[in-house]
C-alpha cells in the first residue's frame, strides 16, 4: 500500500493573526500606574518684621521617626504601627473641648467674630500698606482668615487647634518604602476620619462623598476645622 502524502498546513496567515492578537491585548490591557503622595513642600521666605512670630512649643509638634531598622519611634519612644492611629487621634483631640486638660498636646483656641474681624483688618492693612515684597505672604494670611470667617458664618464660634500644631515625619536613609507608606496611610486616615466625623456633626454627607467643585465651600471649612499639617523633616543619618 502506497504511503499517503500529508497535506501541508497553510501558515501564511498565522503572522497576521498573531499581530492582530498583539494589538488587541495592547489596547485592552490596563497598565498599573504608581500614584504619588500629595505634599506641599515649605518654601523659604523672608519674615515680615511687622508680623508677630507665633511661639512654637514642644506640645505643638508630634515627632514621628522611622529608623534604618524599620523601627517606629513616636516622641522618642518605640511604638508599633498598629498603635500609631490612636496616638495621632489623641494629638488632634486631646484638648478639642477647649479646656486644655493635657499640657502635652496642642491647645485649642476659640474663634469668634471679634477675633476674625480684628485679624482680617490687621492683614488687610499689611497687604495695602506694608512692604511690597511681603504682600503675597500677608495676602495668604488674610485668605486664611477669610476662610475662618466663612466657617464662622456657617457654623458660628468654634474651637481651632493651635496654628503651630503640626506632625513632623523623619525617615533615615535606609527606611523601607513600605513602612513609610504605612505611616502616611495612618496620618491620612486619621485626618479623613476626623473630617468625616465633623460632617456627621454638621449634618453633611460623608466627607468622601463631597464633590471638589460643587462642595468646595464645605471642603474648605473642613480643612479649617481639621487641618492637615504634615511636614517632612531633614533625613537623619
Image (cartoon, grey):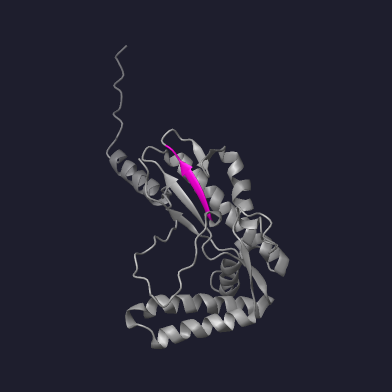
**Where, quadrant-wise, is the C terminus in this rendering?**
top left
Q: Quadrant of the N terminus?
A: top left
Is 94 left or right of 170, judged from the image as shown?
right
Q: As displayed, is residue 67 above or below residue 224?
A: above
Front residue of 235 and 203: 235
As drawn, 49 above or below 88: below
User: Is residue 64 inside the magenta stretch?
Assistant: yes
Say which quarter of the image contains residue 12: top left
Viewed as shown, does residue 120 lie left or right of 232? right
Task: Confirm whether the magenta stretch covers residue 16.
Answer: no
Q: Residue furthest top?
A: 1
Residue 205 horizontal/vertical position (percent): 68, 66
Q: Could you tell me residue 9's position as x and y percent?
A: 31, 31
Residue at 59 percent across and 72 percent down: it is: 215
Q: How many marks?
A: 0
Image height of 35 relative to 82, above or below: below
Q: Whole-percent x and y of residue 208?
A: 60, 61
- In the image, taking residue 13 as reference, residue 125 lies left or right, namely right
Magenta segment: 61-67
User: Viewer-proximal residue, 36 or 85?
Assistant: 85
At 47% from the left edge and 43% from the top edge, which residue is drawn? 65
Magenta span main SS: strand
Q: Nearer the viewer, residue 13 or 68?
A: 68
Q: Residue at x 52, y 82 (%)?
A: 120
Query: x, y percentage for residue 127?
Result: 41, 84
Snapshot quadrant of residue 59: bottom right
Amino acid at each position: 500500500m502506497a504511503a499517503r502524502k500529508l497535506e501541508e498546513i497553510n501558515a501564511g496567515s498565522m503572522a497576521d493573526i498573531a499581530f492582530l492578537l498583539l494589538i488587541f491585548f495592547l489596547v485592552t490591557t490596563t497598565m498599573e500606574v504608581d500614584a504619588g503622595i500629595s505634599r506641599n513642600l515649605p518654601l523659604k521666605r523672608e519674615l515680615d518684621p511687622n508680623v508677630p512670630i507665633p511661639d512654637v512649643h514642644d506640645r505643638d509638634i508630634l515627632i514621628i521617626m522611622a529608623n534604618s531598622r524599620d523601627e517606629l519611634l513616636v516622641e522618642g519612644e518605640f511604638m508599633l504601627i498598629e498603635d500609631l492611629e490612636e496616638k495621632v487621634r489623641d494629638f488632634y483631640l486631646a484638648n478639642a473641648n477647649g479646656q486644655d486638660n493635657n499640657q502635652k498636646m496642642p491647645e485649642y483656641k476659640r474663634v469668634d467674630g471679634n477675633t476674625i474681624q480684628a485679624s482680617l483688618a490687621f492683614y488687610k492693612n499689611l497687604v495695602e500698606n506694608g512692604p511690597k515684597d511681603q504682600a503675597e505672604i500677608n495676602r495668604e494670611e488674610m485668605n486664611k482668615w477669610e476662610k475662618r470667617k466663612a466657617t464662622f458664618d456657617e457654623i458660628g464660634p468654634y474651637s481651632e487647634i493651635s496654628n503651630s500644631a503640626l506632625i513632623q515625619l523623619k525617615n533615615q536613609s535606609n527606611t523601607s518604602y513600605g513602612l513609610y507608606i504605612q505611616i502616611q496611610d495612618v496620618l491620612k486616615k486619621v485626618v479623613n476620619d476626623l473630617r468625616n466625623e465633623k460632617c456627621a456633626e454638621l449634618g453633611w454627607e460623608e466627607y468622601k462623598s463631597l464633590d471638589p467643585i460643587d462642595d468646595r465651600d464645605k471642603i474648605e471649612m473642613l480643612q479649617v476645622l481639621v487641618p492637615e499639617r504634615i511636614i517632612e523633616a531633614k533625613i537623619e543619618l
